[in-house]
Amino acid sequence: MTDPDADRPAQAPVEHLTPAAAVDLGTALTQMAGLVLSRETVDTALQLVTTLAATTTAGTLGAAVTVVDEHGKRSRAASNSAVEEADALQYEYDEGPCLAAWRTREVVRIDDTTTDGRWPRWNEAVSRLGVRSVLSAPLLVGDESIGAMKVYCERPRNYGTHDEHVMRLLAAQAAILLANSQSLQEARRLSRQLTDALASRDAVARATGVLLAQGTASEEDAFAVLAAAARQGDRPVLDVARALVATVAARNRAAGARRPRP
């Protein structure tokens, strides 16, 4: 790593921050490994990831995690607005070290955005923001890459092989946290779908029972009646079934209220 005061960018960055104090890497990994995820702590976990990345790589002024899933590419827990803007430019141009780390599943390092020629549009844009060196590591879960973690610095040639090693370790822990949070969210989603499906089945069964009591010949005929009503009214079968049961229940309550008491 070269003299940290050498070759500073001529243009002031959008946002100037003081690097946070370094923390012990072992302590950082222990914090991450010991974090128990729930829906409420996912964002906290991501914030912890970026904080640890920023504090265990010397000179870092900003860090963030990029998650790539069915919703597309997005940054989570970015440490400041300059990082968010640098990430947004990657998504806009569909190029840059973070996306390259995600796609290639390899650590990507830029020593100087003003001389690196791999992503010319992004490099030129972020150099105007004051970003000069970048280090990005993929988030790997088995054979799948789910995103990348990255750190930015205002100085050129800020990161070296030791920093790459640190980022690999942190990215491995971050990937576990994110994979667990996604699995938890998926489990909750499936649970909601199952609950909704059971509720739908019960409502349709009750409506079918009402039609059978009214003289419909069979369960198949009763469901056909519900389906025909749904098509005619351009409504879901579930809504038709619930409306039918509600109407019959209201009629029965009214009839009970009119019945003379003994």
Image: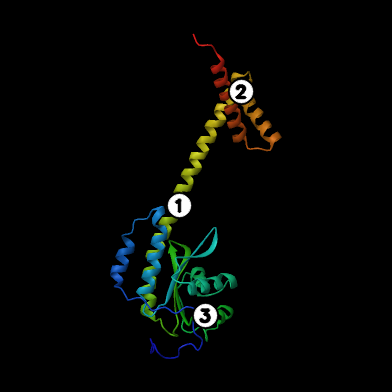
- Give me the residue at 51% from left, 35% from top: 199
**Numbered-mark total:** 3
Q: Earlier in the sequence, mark 1 or mark 2?
A: 1
Q: Earlier in the sequence, mark 3 or mark 2?
A: 3
Mark 1 vs mark 3, CA separation in Å: 36 Å
Residue labelled with disc 1: 185
Q: Please name the amino acid that badge 2 sits on.
A: Leu
Can residue 176 be seen by looking at this rendering? no
Whether residues under marks 1 and 2 lie with C-beta atoms below 8 angstroms apart, the answer is no
| In front: label 1 or label 3 | 3
Residue 49: x %, y % from top left: 39, 66
Quick one: which residue is furthest to the right in this view?
A: 232
Q: Please name the amino acid that badge 3 sits on.
A: Leu
Using residue 1 as the reference point, say whether residue 232 is left or right of it. Answer: right
Observer-nearest residue: 131 or 107? 131
Residue labelled with disc 2: 211
Badge 3 density bin: few <14, some 14–19, many ≥20, Cα 10 Å: many
Q: Secondary structure at mark 2?
A: helix
Can residue 188 be seen by looking at this rendering? yes
Q: Earlier in the sequence, mark 1 or mark 3?
A: 3
Q: Quadrant of residue 88?
A: bottom right
Quick one: which residue is furthest to the top in this view?
A: 262
Residue 240: x %, y % from top left: 62, 32
Label annotation for residue 129? 3
Mark 3 vs mark 2, CA separation in Å: 69 Å
